[in-house]
Image: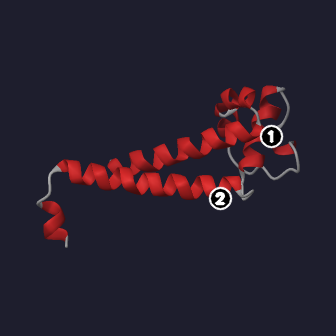
Amino acid sequence: MIPFLTRQPPAVFLGLLVLIVAVEGVLAANLYLSGRLGDWHHFFYAADAVHLGENPYEAHDRGYLYPPLLAFLLQPLLPLGYETAGAVWVLLMAGVIALSAWF
């Protein structure tokens, strides 16, 4: 199968990449909409704490374990609200995975 794939034009690889990311995005959105948010609530409330000048590690239920830089970088999503920001986060992560696969 590998020799077959290596003979294909780059558009085939791009098409496969888009298909994989689309399927992944749909699966992630399904998980998000079914209430399985993973660590999103920790991310969101830590970003809110940083925005208010508080300690992100003390936010919400004290479950934030990540670098403070992540909470700082997520601050622009705060005005969108919890659910919309979560949907944007899912899409951003699908994009990051797509870029990683492309590179």
Q: Residue furthest bottom?
A: 1
* Residue 88 pos. (x, y %): 61, 38
Instruction: Kindly identify which numbered label has been placed on residue 87.
Output: none
Q: How is the image coloured?
A: secondary structure
> Left of 99 or right of it: where is 89?
right
Helix, strand, or loop for circle 1?
A: helix
Residue with the mark numbered 1: 45
Q: Residue furthest left?
A: 7
Query: Which numbered disc, 2 or 1, marks the residue that appears first in the sequence?
Result: 2
Evaluate whether residue 18 shows in this view. Answer: yes
Identify the residue at horizontal 65%, vertical 39% (top origin). 70
In whole angstroms, how far apart are the C-alphas of marks 2 and 1? Answer: 20 Å
Residue with the mark numbered 2: 31
Check the image and report above or below for 11 versus 68: below
Identify the residue at horizontal 19%, vertical 70% (top origin). 2
> Left of 70 or right of it: where is 100?
left
In the foreground, 55 or 71:
71
Check the image and report above or below for 65 versus 75: below
Q: Which amino acid does the dot numbered 2 rest on?
A: Leu
Identify the residue at horizontal 47%, vertical 57% (top origin). 23
Identify the residue at horizontal 14%, vertical 57% (top origin). 8
Helix, strand, or loop for circle 2?
A: helix
Q: Which amino acid does the dot numbered 1 rest on?
A: Tyr
Check the image and report above or below for 91 versus 31: above
> Left of 54 or right of it: where is 31?
left
Label 2 neighbour load within 10 Å: few <14, some 14-19, many 20+: some
* Residue 32 pos. (x, y %): 67, 53
